[in-house]
Amino acid sequence: MSILVVGTVAFDTVETPFGRAERILGGSATYACLAARVIGAPVQLNAVVGRDFPEAHVASLTDRGVDVEGLVRDPEGETFFWAGRYHYDLNTRDTLATHLNVLATFEPDLPASYRTPEIVCLGNLDPTVQSSVIDQTDGSGLVIADTMNFWIDNTPEALGETLKRVDVLVINDEEARQLAGEPNLVRAARKIRALGPETLIVKKGEHGALLFCGDEIFSAPAYPLEDVIDPTGAGDTFLGGFAGHLARCGATDPDAMRQAVVVGSALASFVVEAFGPDRLLSVTAADLDERIDSFRRLSAVPHIISA
């Protein structure tokens, strides 16, 4: 199964209590593509960069097998740039700068070879842009989307129209409560799924993730790490890993979804171990299998002898 990833390819400057990295490779599509490629899923990237984007970064993607035919270079502008500073607990951050640059006028125009994907993976973008991507596909693919509080606050009608066309929505717990207007996540999930997405994944950071699929709720833990360096891109890595596993197994049933949540969580546990996508560029399929085994042991429920 092929995956179309539409999102941002960017420069990030990241500061955490453990260091600082200047103008490193970032962006939602970057992390999602690299995560899916760890699993070996075919990935097509649609995004825009500026004249300042180095060929070495493009090579980082192509060397991992990402199809970059849809990576557009705008010779007149500069690449999207974000800078942020994380607090000591790494759960909260301050955005120091956001320069949309070429992203401000980006209108996806999918190459012909990109228009029949089995999975459409929409990173955090304006919901009207997300809808335009869906319009350009043949409509047969599973649509997985991300969003954020900015779009929930500022474009609720456009977001509502896009959600009607989304099969799987991936958001964090704060965004779920905000979107539903409901503090309880179980009730919030019911309200969000009534908006369109049949499946909802609520990311809870260091507390794992919840999957609402069919009549079931599945909870996956977060992997306990001694060294968390940079959480940037963890959610996008989860998204790519989730989509990548579905593509690899060729299924989208509830059992495949549960497996995909674990795979996405495992990959996200790698990316936080270094600044930017460095760990995704070095992690192997064998590393991933070992981490998934650790997840299995971590969440195993022992047999309980009744009285």
Image (cartoon, rainbow, N blue to C red):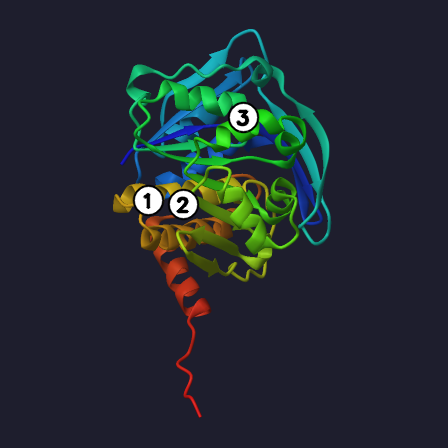
* Structural crowding at the residue carrying mark 2, measured as other residues with C-alpha within 10 Å and reported as few (<14), some (14–19) or many (≥20): many
Give left or right: position of 83 versus 44. right
- Tell me whether the residue at label 2 lies in contact with that at label 3, contact meaning CB atoms closer than 8 angstroms: no
Q: Residue at x 55, y 43 (%)?
A: 171
* Structural crowding at the residue carrying mark 1, measured as other residues with C-alpha within 10 Å and reported as few (<14), some (14–19) or many (≥20): many
Of helix, strand and loop, which one carries label 1?
helix
- Tell me whether the residue at label 2 lies in contact with that at label 1, contact meaning CB atoms closer than 8 angstroms: yes
In the depicted structure, whether residue 150 falls above or below residue 17? above
Quadrant of the frame with the C terminus = bottom left
* Three-letter code for the amino acid on which mark 3 is drawn: Pro
- To which quarter of the image does residue 303 belong? bottom left
Kindly tell me whether residue 281 is visible in this rendering. Answer: no
Give left or right: position of 279 versus 83. left
Judge by depth and name the residue closer to the eye, 171 or 2. 171
In the depicted structure, whether residue 266 falls above or below residue 7? below
- The residue wearing badge 2 is 242
- In front: mark 2 or mark 3? 3
Judge by depth and name the residue closer to the eye, 13 or 254. 254
* Three-letter code for the amino acid on which mark 2 is drawn: Phe
- To which quarter of the image does residue 166 belong? top left
The residues tagged by marks 1 and 3 sit, at their Cα atoms, a distance apart of 24 Å
Q: Residue at x 57, y 12 (%)?
A: 105
Of the image marks 2 and 3, the number of the one nearer the N terminus: 3
* Structural crowding at the residue carrying mark 3, measured as other residues with C-alpha within 10 Å and reported as few (<14), some (14–19) or many (≥20): many
- To which quarter of the image does residue 12 belong? top right
- The residue wearing badge 3 is 127
The residues tagged by marks 2 and 1 sit, at their Cα atoms, a distance apart of 7 Å
* Rendered image: mark on residue 246: 1
Of helix, strand and loop, which one carries label 2?
helix
